[in-house]
Amino acid sequence: MSRIATVSTGTPFSERLPSAFGYPLRGAALASCIGLALLHYVGLLPSFIGFFASLMVWTATWRYAADCMLHTAHGYADPPDVSLGGNESAGWALAAIHLMIVALCVLAIVFFPKALWPVLILSALALPAIDMSLAFDGNLAAALNPIHVWRIVTGFGVAYLIPVAINLLTGALLALASLATGFLPKLLALPLYAFAYTYLIILGFHLMGAMIHERHERFGMAPEAEALAREVHQDADEQLLDAVRETSTRDPQAAIAMLVARMQDRSAPAPLHQAYRQLLQQQGLRDGLLTHGQIWAAALLANGESRRALGLLQECIDIDPAFLPDDPGNTGTLAELAARLGMSRLAVKLCRGYLSTWPTAPEAPRYGLLAARQLGMQLGQPTEAMVLLGKLAADWPDHPLHREMLSLKRQLQDMQTSL
């Protein structure tokens, strides 16, 4: 299980505010902003179909925003993944209340123009409290109770004005978007403005979640992120690392023994692996470093951390130039990554190691061809590349890459002739 990024309940809201503006641009929140912005194209569909489709998009927007607020309120630092289930009741309730506000504004403009500004100001002041109530339980009647709304407003003090300001900015942006066709083509303006106000909605709900998290006791909440971190022994890992550091000053071997069992689990976090390697280096345990390199490299690749695995591989090669991952799939993956990153010598080394260790593996021609391409095109060693290609072509005459081997060999021969 990957590490759970949490925020301590003791973190002041003022410290979280600067980084909050990047929240909608991370992980699933960014994907949601982009996806929902593009989905707003459904508003171009004819009459009732377009209206109903747009309503679905807005409901999905509020639903994900409600999920973000609850996720933040429970102490999670990162945005939640998109869920098909999600906070559906909150999504419908939030869509309904915001449509009602829009309807009130339209009625004021048509029948009571002088009432427009009071309606707007009152709506902007009350909406964050209503939104928070709806996101928690989806109960529209409770959310519209003035006493309940006032209790929420007074519970946050001056900080409550921040989501109010974001609501006003979102409303202004929506009004500007309705006039955008005069400045930009509608097909371009629609997703741009949709992305901007989706960003603001998620930001506003995230900030409201942060405000609730700071005052969770008033809401009778027990933030679940910290509890989950304890359940998966995340805190235990930090305690283990502290104990290892303390023990290592007087008994390095005992400190190593404390880490051995934890290193066998692929979920062990990087700081524990790094501490383990540092202790092995201090004790000059070369074989231990190489064995751990095999285990950790496999774990890193399994968790999608291929670049870190490549760095670990280089560290192990510095210890033993003959070092090679003990799994052909991992060796090939790292060879391809090294080639993409321009580390041609390392890529060739890995490919050659693959060919010598697993010469009859089905993927051997693929990595032989990769080595030849790096030798001939990147390292300026066309003769070595042609020798390798000739051997590959002879050993694998019926392989699907046989024609490509011969083609690359002819290309290298032509390059040599032209020189």
Image: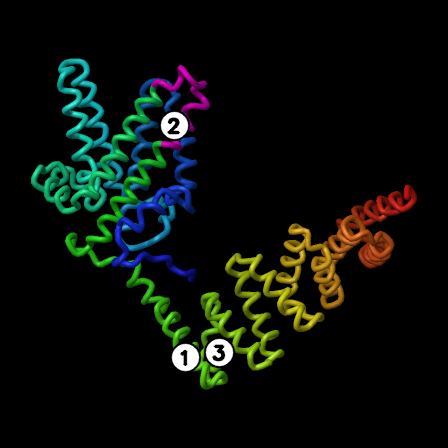
**Horizontal arrangement in the rendering, residue 45 relative to residue 300 (left or right):** left
Residue at image location 17% in from the left, 34% down from the top: 125
The residue that label 1 is drawn on is 246
Compare marks 1 and 2 and give the one earlier in the sequence.
Answer: 2
- Secondary element at tag 2: helix
| Residues at marks 3 and 2 touching, judged by CB atoms closer than 8 Å | no
What is the C-alpha distance between the residues marked 3 and 2?
54 Å
Residue at image location 43% in from the left, 19% down from the top: 186
Q: Position of residue 395 (x, y in %)?
A: 82, 59
**Horizontal arrangement in the rendering, residue 77 relative to residue 146 (left or right):** right
Q: Is residue 308 above or below residue 91?
A: below
Instruction: Locate the N terminus and report the quarter of the image it occupies.
Output: bottom left
Q: Nearer the viewer, residue 101 or 16?
A: 16
Q: Amino acid at mark 1?
A: Glu
Q: Is residue 193 above or below residue 163?
A: above
The residue that label 2 is drawn on is 193
The residue that label 3 is drawn on is 260
What is the C-alpha distance between the residues marked 3 and 1?
16 Å
Numbered badge on residue 338? none
Q: Position of residue 157 (x, y in %)?
A: 16, 44
- Secondary element at tag 3: helix
Read off the magenta span: 179-196
